[in-house]
Structures are given as C-alpha cells and as structure tokens.
Amino acid sequence: MEPQGDTGVKTRFPPYRRFVRGTAIALAGLLLGCGPSVAADQPFFVTQPFSGTLIALFFVAQLIVIVVLLVVRVQRGRAAKTLRESEERLRRAVLDAPIPIMMYAEDGEVLLINRQWTELTGYTHAEIPAVDTWTRKASVRNRTDSGDGTGSLHAPERSQRDGECVLTTSTGEQRIWDFRSSPLGRLSDGRRFTISMAMDITERTRAEELRAAKQQADAANRAKSEFLASMSHELRTPMNAILGFAQLLQDNPKEPLRPPQKEYVQQILKGGRHLVDLINEVLDLAGIEGGVVALTIDDVAPRQILAECLDLARTLADRHGIALVDGAAGRELPAVRADATRLKQVVLNLLSNAIKYNRDGGRVTLGCKPTAGGMLRVSIADTGLGISPQKQGHLFQPFRRLGAEFTDIEGTGIGLTITKRLIELMDGQIGFETEVGRGSTFWIELPLAADKPAAKGAVTARQYSPAEGSRTAQARGHTMLYVEDDPANRKLMAEIIGRVPNLTMVSADSAETGLELARERKPDVIVMDIGLPGANGFEALKRLREMEQTRHVPVIALTANAMPGDVERGAQAGFHRYLTKPVNIDEVLAAIEDALEGVS
C-alpha cells in the first residue's frame, strides 16, 4: 500500500525497499556534493571529508535498520509459528479429552465441541452452531428447575451458569451432567470466549437416589415391622385368654359341657384359631416382603419332611373324609437345597389346601421325583372341583380366595402367596395344573444337592398329643414359677396347672418379684412372659443364670412376642422352649413335662 499525501496513513516498507530508498538518497547527496570546483584528480572523500562521512554513516544506519527489521520479522514468524503449534496442541487436547468440552464466544457462537461431547449427546458441531441451539435441542435445564426450560444452563445474554443439569441426548435419553466453566481470554476479533467442561454423573446420581430410596424403604419396613410386632402382641394377649379358657371349657372332666355348649365353645375355638392363623400369616408375609426372613439353606432329606407333613395332615384329612396317598413311599429321594422348616411349611400348606378344597370322599396324592433340569419336583394332586380359567390369574395374590370366602371352608387367602415367596427365596419354582371338574395338581421344584446320597425310609418327628400332655400328671412334688403381668393369663395358667396333680404354681407380676420368688422357693421350672414391666424376660433370664440358686433351672418363654426375630432371639438367649401366645394347653403341658424330665 502506497502513502497517500497528508492523510496520515503510514506506509510500511519492506526491508529491501528501505535499502533502495536509502541508497537513492545517498547517491543524491553524493552528486550534490560534487561541484565543478572539485579537482578531477582528487577522490570525493578527500575533497569532501564531512559529506563522505555522513554518507557512510547513513549507509551503515540503513544496514543496521535492515538487519533489525529482518530479525524482528524472523522472530515474529517464529512466534506466530509457536502460537499456531500451541493452539493446535490445545485444539487436539480438547478434541481428545475424555470429558465433554465446549468452547464458545460471548455472543453464543460455538467455537468447538470435542469428540466426547458428540459421542455422549449425539450432536455434532454442525448441528449446534450456537449455544442457544444446543440448549433448545438438548432441553438443558438445572436439576432444581421445574423443567419448563426457564433454567437453561447456557444463555448468550447472561453469564455461564455451572452446576448439575439435566439434558436430553439425540436419542431421547436423559442424562445428568455437572458443568464447570472458565473464561479463556479474547479472540483476535476482540470477543471474549469461554471453555465449559462437563462430567456425566448420571449413574452416580442414580446410585445415590437408589441408596436414598433404599434407606427410606428400610425405614418404612422397620416402622412396619415395629407396628406389626406391636399389633401382634396386642392381639395375641387377649386371644390367649379367649382360646385358653375355651380349651379349659371344652375339656373339663369335672364340669362337662352339654352338647349345645360344646358346639358354642367349638365355634369360639374355630374363630379364634382362624384369627390367630390370619395374624401369623400376615406377619409371615410382611416379614418375607420386608426382607427380614432369614433362611438357612442346607442339604435336606425330603423323605423325612414329607413323612412328617403327611402325619400332620392326616388328622385334617380324616376330619374331612379324604384319603391321603403317599405316591413316593419306598422310593429313594435325593437330597435338596432348602430350608427344612420352610419346606415343611410349604408342603403342609399345599396338603392342607388339597384337603380343604377337595370333594367329600376325595383323595390327595403326594408325589415326588427328580426332573431332567436338576430339580426335585414335589406334587400334591387332589380330586376337587378344579380352578376356572377366569380365576387362575389371581391364584397367588394375597387375600384372594377365589369365591371360597362365601363358603364354610377355613382359610385366609395368604397361604399360597407365602408359599410362592418362600419357594422363590429357596431358588425353586411353583406351578399348578388344573382341570375343572377333575381336580388340581400343585407342584414345587427345588434344586438338588450336589453329590448327596439318596435318603431312604421315613422318620416321623415327635408330636405332642393330649395323651402325652396328660403324662405331666406323673410329676410329683414339683413347683412351677409363672412370671406374667396380665391377671387373666395368670388365672388361665393357674387353671391349667390346677389339673396336674402334685405340681404347684406360684406366680409373680414382674421380673423383679419373680427373681425374689425364684431365690426363695427354688422352683423346678419357670414359665416367663417376655414383655414385662420393668426388666423384660430376656433380662430376667440373664439374671437367673447369674444366680447360683437358679442357674440350672429350665426357663420356658410364653409370650405374645411372636415375630421371627423374637423367636430366633429367644432360642439364642437360652430359653428351654420358646412358646408363643395364644396358648396351646397340650403344648404348654408337654413343654413343662420335658423340662421336668431331668429334675429329681
């Protein structure tokens, strides 16, 4: 560009033009200095020493300026090259960074987004040339905002907002990013620009939310368990008196009931036991669904358990005129992986249902055989009416009795639900086959124990019957201490023990009083409630074991604390037996007899 007069525009000359210009000036000066008076035979620098010196200095100055300009130009080139290389390294570092990064100008222009940003969101730089375009496409909003778009993370007209934000990817998936931004300076055109980095915290946030939800659920389960335990205790305490005195009325040789009275008492017992069953099953179901039921999975011999279940179910079958057939009798059955107590509960429930929902004079057949899938299938077939297709979908739902609630068939509608949950907790399966008018077959499958020999024969567990309970009358000169704060329960126990010759009962209404009586009377057996005023039954048992006089006295717990955790804690505490209310007279007498067997 050439100079333009006095416009004030300065023209920059390349170094070689400066040199040519300087040379021309020097030559002009040289010509002007050479006049006619100068001797032709004398050199210029001799005749004009001052002018020659000036010209020489001028040439040297021009050369110095040229060298300086060349050096400056080289340095500027090197600096520009270094800057370009630095910018390229920054650009590559941003592009290859393992976290999402966006660089944008203050007017909203997106200068760069890296590969991780595109990979996680599905949006390319061409699709989001401006911040507001990105905000609209991804519906970016702060997590604390309502979701109406008013809380967008980026907005050209206001400063960058950092924090946790919810955004939507190109596939419609919602993710949670934590943004952090920092200004980087100005562009060559004077615009400020910013780098915004993000971290995808979706999984972490969801894990935290799950932990919080689990904590809330655990708290709710604990509250539910505490409520159920409290309600169980409050319901069992009056039921203990109702069923206990009804049993005494039913079996009173001194004052036998007339036939109508016997029927009334039987109805009281029937209704009371149904209520107790309902309480037990509701607690059982609540415990299973709340995850508080602990199973002891071991190698179990099914033959023994099946024999016990058949023996227990035979009384119910005889009452309904149903024939029980052991289709697996004499067969060798492999061991299974299961909880023995819960397996027994499951089989008993299926046998009970098959008997109750059968036809008069019907038949129930128990079968057992291994399957090709490494399982043992136990089946219970009945000759009942079958289940219609419309009702089959509700079969394992709680409190659904499929019309049986309008009949005189006893039941709560929870048994099958509990059975299904227990079998699944033991890694098993349950199913059924039914034909209307022909009957139903319910089956369960449990995994076989590895490398376990088959179990032969049947072992029947000891069962207490009224006849066995009456043998307590053989006790001679024994004393029983009963610690119970409820007067009705003390009166009930007094009536029960009053029918046993030579067994004397003393009672206390608190643990403290009971401990004093135990030291004074030295009883042969102690029956103790758990929920006592002051010290509870567990604390009383501990203090009894610490005293020399009562250290070896068997202590039987008889309590309304019947939650699974209570029973387990009672067994670990060292009670001789842990019985739950409502009281079963035969069971109580059998427990007392068992405790007195080792007493001289």
Image (cartoon, rainbow, N blue to C red):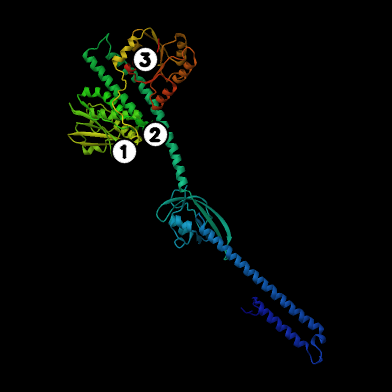
Q: Is mark 3 on a helix, strand or loop?
A: helix
What residue type is disc 2 on? Gly
Q: What element carries label 2?
A: loop
Residue 106 appearing in the image: no
**Where residue 421 sits: x, y (%)?**
33, 34
Residue denoted by label 2: 291
N-terminal label among 3 and 2: 2
Q: Which of marks 1 and 2 is in front?
A: 1
- The quarter of the picture where residue 13 lies is bottom right
Tell me which residue sits at (40%, 24%) in the image.
Answer: 567
Residue denoted by label 1: 374
Q: How many neighbours does mark 3 have within 10 angstroms: few (below 14), some (14-19), or many (20 or more)?
A: many
Q: Distance between the residues labelled 3 and 1?
A: 45 Å
What residue type is disc 1 on? Gly
Depicted 331 relative to depicted 483: above or below: below
Q: How far apart are marks 3 and 2 (CA)?
A: 34 Å
The quarter of the rendered structure image containing the C terminus is top left
Residue 359 appearing in the image: yes
Instruction: Name the one closer to the observer, 227 or 61.
Output: 61
Instruction: Name the one closer to the observer, 190 or 340.
Output: 340
Tell me how many marks there are.
3
Q: Which mark is residue 592?
A: 3
Q: Nearer the viewer, mark 3 or mark 2?
A: 3
Instruction: Name the one closer to the observer, 319 or 450.
Output: 450
